[in-house]
Image: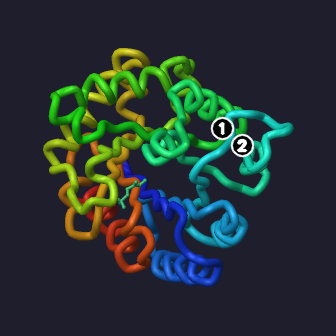
Amino acid sequence: MKSKLVIGNWKMNKDFEAAEELTTAIQEAIENINLKTEVVLCPPFPYLELVTDMADESNFNAGAQNCSQFNDGAYTGEVSAAMLAGMGVTFCIVGHSERRKYFHETSEVIAEKVDRLIEQEIIPVVCCGEVLEERQAGRHFEVVEAQIKEALFHLSKEKFEHVVIAYEPVWAIGTGETATPAQAEEMHKFIRTLVEKKYGTETAYNSYILYGGSCNPSNAMDLFTQEDVDGGLIGGASLKSGDFVAIIEAAETAVNEN
Ligand code: 13P
């Protein structure tokens, strides 16, 4: 089994002091471990410099939660991919369901953000996932397929190889209701098959497909031992160092046991 990727999405949480405390606690917990798992912390923009500085001397990476679809110019309040790259940010979440819902991000905009990030050699972590009504209506595969095709399938194979996909069923985000390991695996396999049809077997195998949605220390291991679950995009549990480190440990164990 290939090594895992565990990403913490802090969303809009923590004051500066608490952000520093959390980053330090994670750093101290993992600094002496020869980690196979790749760890990424995605704080809010104002704390990125803190995290990129600490990432320089640590075995984790710094990621952003969003970026602009534009290169530069008169876009008040926006942050470009080039600015992130200049700070040493190496990952960026794109198309999170919260951005689709509250900020009306469309697949078209998401595809543009993916392009800007790849131009700056930042790995886009592209989110997809159905809402509850779509799952209840049996439309979850169709919805996720459209999201992936619209956001990513304009990319050449070479560029696609720099992308991470995160499957986050919207009904599982922040609700405490996790997808069962079987539900996660079924969707991850479906996504990998889509990638295989478009880009070939090797690219599909090498692609990272993460699960997100109420992932915590008690369910991480069962999710991460699924064949097509390559790690997690963690929200609430990434805000507590003990929980986040336990999830990283589950990722390490899942790889070692397989
Ligand atoms: P929770 O882990 O809080 O459900 O959030 C998942 C998520 O949205 C990560 O991007």
Tell me the residue at 69%/71% (across/down): 50
Residue behind mark 2:
81
Tell me the residue at 28%/22% (across/down): 142
Residue 186 vs residue 118: left or right? left
Above or below 222: residue 116: above
Residue behind mark 1:
117
Above or below 211: residue 61: below
Residue 6 place in picture, x, y as percent: 42, 57
Q: For this rendering, which residue is in front, 185 or 78?
A: 78
Quadrant in the picture for residue 176: bottom left
Whether residue 258 is visible to the viewer of this picture, yes or no, is no
Q: Tell me which label, 2 or 1, sits earlier in the chain.
A: 2
**Callout 1, which amino acid?**
Leu
Query: Which residue ends up furthest to the right in the rendered image?
Result: 73
Q: Secondary structure at mark 1?
A: helix
| Quadrant position of ligand 1 | bottom left
Q: For this rendering, which residue is in front, 38 or 33?
A: 38
Circle 2 residues within 10 Å: few <14, some 14–19, many ≥20: many
**Callout 2, which amino acid?**
Ala
Tell me the residue at 52%/59% (across/down): 40
Residue 109 vs residue 182: left or right? right
Q: Secondary structure at mark 2?
A: helix
Residue 133 place in picture, x, y as percent: 22, 36
Q: Are marks 2 and 1 in contact (CB under 8 Å)?
A: yes
Whether residue 45 is visible to the viewer of this picture, yes or no, is yes
Tell me the residue at 75%/50% (across/down): 77
Residue 111 place in picture, x, y as percent: 57, 27
